[in-house]
Structure formats: structure tokens, C-alpha cells
Amino acid sequence: EIQMTQSPSSLPASVGDRVIITCRASQNIRRFLNWYQHRPGKAPKLLIYGASTLQSGVPSRFSGSGSGTEFTLTINSLQPEDFATYFCQQSYSSPPYTFGQGTKLEIK
Amino acid sequence: QVQLLASGPGLVEPSQTLSLTCTVSGDSISSGSFYWSWIRQHPQRGLEWIGYVYKSGATYDNPSLKSRLRISIDTSRNQFSLKLRSVSDADTAVYFCARDRGIDGPMGAFDVWGLGTMVTVSS
């Protein structure tokens, strides 16, 4: 099973900041990496798939990059609604798909 | 707009069977070529993919749960379901149902999620 490790686990930031969240895979997953946002009491939301493709309707301040074992999610100009928990997830080859443990983006 | 709603008992006794249903609204579960998944989130832990089902009834289970798991689909009711046998405290989690965005096969990227339903295993 492919292990996904996110860092940091908690990230204090302010509105207007640029933040970067990192996700590492335990083996090469090419670009089969997805990012989700989860706000309390809401359904998780797909932000990015295929490492860098923005899901329809997601604001352009979100971007993803990386391949192989290292990936990043960047959020430019943080908005109040962006404070949430972010998960990465690999979808390489056959299931089981596995998720990172999450990064909680908190108001500083 | 497709919406998913997971439902079922919030409390299950140890060694019993956990049963959940996901109701799909806004589209017919059998009209497209989507795969439908169950995913859970343990308290204080990350997310765990449980398995998926296709409209044909074909399933793929997480090997870690396979011996206890049954995922099924009822296209006439526009629902898919999960049954997990012999539950223990380790199965306490929020259970989500989700749609895989892949059209020509599962992509493993979930573009529609339900809110999730909390299930506690306790006597």
C-alpha cells in the first residue's frame, strides 16, 4: 500500500498570505495525485486532480505541482473561506487509494 | 446537480453488522459510467478508501476490509450500500459516499461527496 505523508499537519496563516502544503508518496505515483478541501460540516471538495489540473469551479488561486513522489498545493492570496483541512490522495494504479493525514490551515 | 446522502444507524454494537445506504439525487445512478465509492474518516486520523461499486454490480474492495465487506448497488432505488460485518471500535468513523469523476473507468478522484454520517461502535 502506498503511504502518503503531508506536511505540515497544521499551518497558521492570515488572509492574503500565500501558503504551500507538501505531500510525499512512499513510491513513484507519477502524477496520480489529487487534492481535497474539507471544511467542518461540509462535504469534502475536489480541488485538483492529476497533480495540477484544476477541478471545474475551483478558484485559480489554487494550484498544484509535482510528480513522482513530491507534490505541492499552493494557495495564493488566502481568502477567509480557505481556512479548512486539506488532504492529498494518490490514485496510482489499482486501488486501494490512500490519503495523506491532512493539513489544517488555521487563522494566525 | 448530483447530490449524495449517506444514511444509517449512528450506533452499532461490537461484532454486529454496520449497514449504510447512499442515496443519489440529481441524476440516475445507471445512466452514466461512474464508479461509486465509500470512504471513511476515523477520529483524529486520515481518510481511508473502503471500496467502490459500478452500476453493473462489480465491486473493488480495500483488501484490508475485504473479508468483512459487501458493497452493492440498487439502480431501481438510485442507491448503493455498504455492509461491514463483525465491527469493532476500530470501525468507528465518519462514513462518506462519493462519486469517482472518471467516465471511462475509475480515476480515483472523487468529485462529488456526501456530507458523511457518523457511526459509533459501542455497546
Image (cartoon, rainbow, N blue to C red):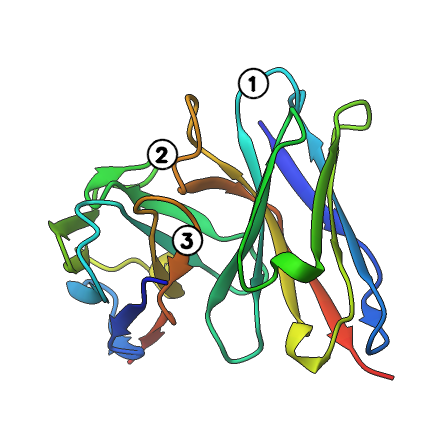
Check the image and report above or below for B56 versus A83: above
Kindly identify which chain the residue marked by label 1 belongs to. Answer: B
Other residues around mark 3 within 10 Å, as few (<14) / some (14–19) / many (≥20):
many
Q: Residue at x 36, y 61 (%)?
A: A87
* Residue B26: percent from left, percent from top: 66, 25
Q: Earlier in the sequence, mark 3 or mark 2?
A: 2
Whole-angstrom CA distance, mark 1 to mark 2, is: 21 Å
Q: How many marks?
A: 3
Discs 1 and 3 carry the same chain letter:
no
Disc 3 and disc 2 in contact, CB within 8 angstroms: no
Q: Nearer the viewer, mark 1 or mark 3?
A: 3
The three-letter amino acid code for the residue at tag 2 is Gly
Q: What element carries label 1?
A: loop
Check the image and report above or below for B68 versus B102: below
Q: Residue furthest bottom?
A: B123
Q: Which residue is drawn at 64% across and 65% down?
A: B94
* Residue B113: percent from left, percent from top: 55, 45
Check the image and report above or below for B102 versus A105: above
Q: Can residue A17 be seen in this view?
A: no
Kindly identify which chain the residue marked by label 3 belongs to. Answer: A
Q: Nearer the viewer, mark 1 or mark 2?
A: 1
Pointer 2 residue: A57
The three-letter amino acid code for the residue at tag 1 is Gly
Question: As drawn, is B102 to the left or to the right of B48?
Answer: left
Other residues around mark 2 within 10 Å, as few (<14) / some (14–19) / many (≥20):
few
* Residue B120: percent from left, percent from top: 75, 74
Give the numbered dot on residue A97: 3
Pointer 1 residue: B32
